[in-house]
């Protein structure tokens, strides 16, 4: 059984049904049940919904709980449709407790088979050194696909669920996913622009980034002690579940920045079994020669690797001794089909 998609319109003149906000459009097709199995079957009994969003800046925060939803920007470019909010981790709420990382997201995806095209997700709270973590997009579901989207933020721009099994500090996972089943989601990001500074791609999801621009933003105004050589930023902070063969894979991506040379790390392990591999990526001069940081974790647990890196930031001889320069045979295993366990996104 294949159902015809229902089309909703947000600020698209001449179209009906017409809504003034994305939240209102989603509320009109509210779906309460949330399938937490993995891998989840395609819900053919749930009508697909396409939300067409006209050009504009939408200051709202919302959660997608319905399976088979597509958010489709209708501007000339992804920058014409901006979904933005400004919650941040250090904010003290009315109960006297900090908001924390996982209640700061502008948009949270809590459903399977989500798609977004041609739009921007942004958290504009400010730099992490001032406001703490501020998530632009929180993706908690299987088979989630973003194409030609921008994700803008500073610290913790993109969270790819699942959360680790246990927090380090009490209350560290406070938020909507704290007590929910850990869904091992598969996500694909194609032709996207992702901006941040500290751990701005993080989490336990199995993610394939294809032909994306990954921009490390210099934290303007941050004063550093004279002679300070510590990194200005970290691109990835994976928390891949133990036993998974793949975590984050970045293929044919372009790493750019306005940071000084040699001040940004390719990644560090949020949890012990983190996995991150770059395949045929262009690395700017902002990448630190050692490339990777161990964050005090056991070197025999996590896995960091590169194959075919090029550009001024490619420096295989100087890379951390716990990282790997893959052979052609090893790199050949990192196909989208293998990494995403047979799922073909965008089809």
Image: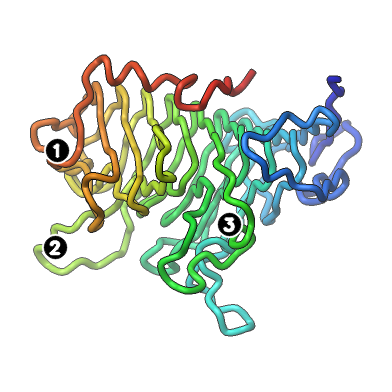
Residue 189 screen position, x and y as percent: 51, 31
Q: Secondary structure at mark 2?
A: loop
Residue 11 screen position, x and y as percent: 79, 40
Q: Which residue is mark 1?
A: 319
Q: Earlier in the sequence, mark 2 or mark 1?
A: 2
The CA distance from mark 2 to mark 3 is: 32 Å
Q: Secondary structure at mark 3?
A: loop
Left or right of residue 130, residue 258 in this image: left
Q: Secondary structure at mark 1?
A: loop
Residue 177 screen position, x and y as percent: 61, 58
Q: Which of the 4 image quarters holds residue 16?
A: top right
Hey, which residue is sitting farthest right in the picture?
A: 16
Q: Earlier in the sequence, mark 1 or mark 3?
A: 3
Residue sitting nearer the eye, 321 or 197 = 321
Mark 3 Cα shell of 10 Å, populated few (<14), some (14-19), many (≥20): many
Quick check: 210 above or below 264? above
Mark 2 Cα shell of 10 Å, populated few (<14), some (14-19), many (≥20): few
**Residue visible at 76% across and 34% down in the picture:** 52
Look at discs 2 and 3 and give the one toward the viewer: 3
The CA distance from mark 1 to mark 3 is: 34 Å
Residue 191 seen in this snapshot? yes
Mark 1 Cα shell of 10 Å, populated few (<14), some (14-19), many (≥20): some
Q: Earlier in the sequence, mark 2 or mark 3?
A: 3
**Res. 210 mark:** none
Q: Which residue is mark 3?
A: 105
Q: Which of the 4 image quarters holds residue 82?
A: top right
């Amino acid at each position: 059984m294949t159902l015809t998609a229902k089309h909703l319109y947000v600020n698209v003149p001449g179209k009906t049904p017409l809504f003034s906000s994305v939240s209102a459009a989603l509320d009109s097709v509210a779906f309460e049940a949330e399938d937490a199995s993995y891998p989840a079957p395609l819900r053919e009994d749930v009508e697909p919904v396409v939300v067409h969003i006209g050009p504009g800046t939408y200051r709202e925060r919302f959660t997608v709980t319905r399976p088979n939803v597509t958010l489709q920007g209708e501007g000339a470019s992804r920058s014409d449709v901006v979904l933005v909010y400004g919650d941040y981790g250090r904010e003290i709420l009315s109960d006297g407790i900090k908001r924390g990382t996982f209640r700061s997201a502008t948009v949270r995806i809590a459903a399977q088979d989500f798609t977004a095209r041609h739009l921007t997700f942004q958290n504009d709270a400010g730099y992490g050194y001032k406001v703490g973590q501020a998530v632009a997009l929180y993706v908690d579901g299987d088979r989630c696909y973003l194409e030609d989207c921008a994700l803008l933020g500073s610290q913790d721009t993109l969270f790819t669920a699942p959360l680790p099994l246990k927090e380090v500090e009490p209350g560290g996972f406070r938020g909507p996913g704290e007590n929910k089943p850990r869904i091992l989601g598969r996500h694909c990001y194609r032709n996207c622009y992702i901006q941040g500074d500290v751990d701005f791609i993080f989490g336990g999801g199995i993610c394939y980034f294809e032909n994306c621009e990954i921009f490390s933003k210099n934290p303007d105004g941050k004063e550093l002690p004279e002679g300070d050589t510590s990194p200005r930023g970290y691109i990835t902070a994976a928390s891949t579940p133990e036993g998974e063969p793949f975590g984050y894979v970045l293929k044919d991506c372009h790493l750019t920045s306005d940071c000084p040379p040699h001040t940004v790390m390719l990644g560090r392990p949020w949890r012990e079994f983190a996995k991150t591999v770059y395949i045929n990526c262009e690395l700017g001069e902002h990448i630190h020669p050692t490339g990777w940081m161990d964050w005090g974790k056991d070197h025999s647990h996590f896995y960091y690797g590169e194959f075919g890196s090029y550009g001024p930031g490619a420096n295989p001889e100087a890379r951390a001794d716990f990282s790997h320069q893959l052979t052609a045979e090893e790199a050949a295993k990192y196909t989208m089909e293998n990494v995403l366990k047979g799922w073909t996104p965008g089809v």
